[in-house]
Image: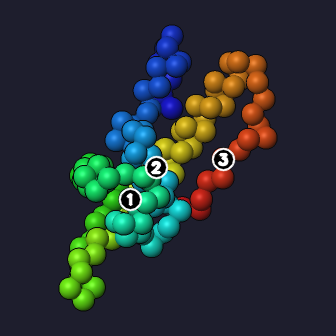
Amino acid sequence: MTKTDGAPFAFEGLDRVMHEKARLGLLSSLVAHPKGLAFSDLKQLCRLTDGNLSRHLQVLQEAGLVEITKSFEGTRPQTHCALTRSGRRRFLDYLALLEQLVRDAAQTAGEDFSHARLRILPG
């Protein structure tokens, strides 16, 4: 997290591409499934409509976080989504930044959240 002089809670390090609620859910789902997921599985896991999911995946793909592969199983089209190598690294770094943000906020509030460590997946 970048701390600006005199503005430690400006949260300059937050990435709008990843921080949006639906995209945070998509990235969390994909980081937990290193081989990726089918479009329909992501849709169900994140409770998104086809249109919303497509749009959020497009943003993530344009940012280089996600790769989308289209194929056919028989005559049925299949869309497979997975984190790119750099997307996985960037997301894990982002989770570490969020963890630090929570620690800083807790410290400022005088709370001890050391017992509530995030479980970061191996990179």
Q: Look at mark 1 in the image and give the residue it sits on.
A: 43
Q: Closer to us: mark 1 or mark 2?
A: 1
The answer to whether mark 3 and mark 1 are in CB contact below 8 A is: no
Name the outermost residue toward the top. Answer: 6
Q: Which residue is found at the position 54% from the left and 39% from the top?
A: 97
- Check the picture and name the quadrant holding the C terminus: bottom right
Name the outermost residue toward the bottom. Answer: 74
Q: Which mark is residue 9?
A: none
Q: Closer to us: mark 3 or mark 1?
A: 1
Task: Name the N-terminal-most of marks 1 and 2.
Answer: 2
Q: Look at mark 3 in the image and give the residue it sits on.
A: 118
Q: In front here: 32 or 13?
A: 32
Task: Name the N-terminal-most of marks 3 and 1.
Answer: 1
> Residue flagged by tag 2: what amino acid is it?
Gly
Q: In front here: 37 or 76?
A: 76
The answer to whether mark 1 and mark 2 are in CB contact below 8 A is: no
Q: Which residue is found at the position 47% from the left and 58% from the top?
A: 45
Residues at marks 3 and 1, CA–CA distance in whole angstroms: 25 Å
> Residue flagged by tag 3: what amino acid is it?
Leu
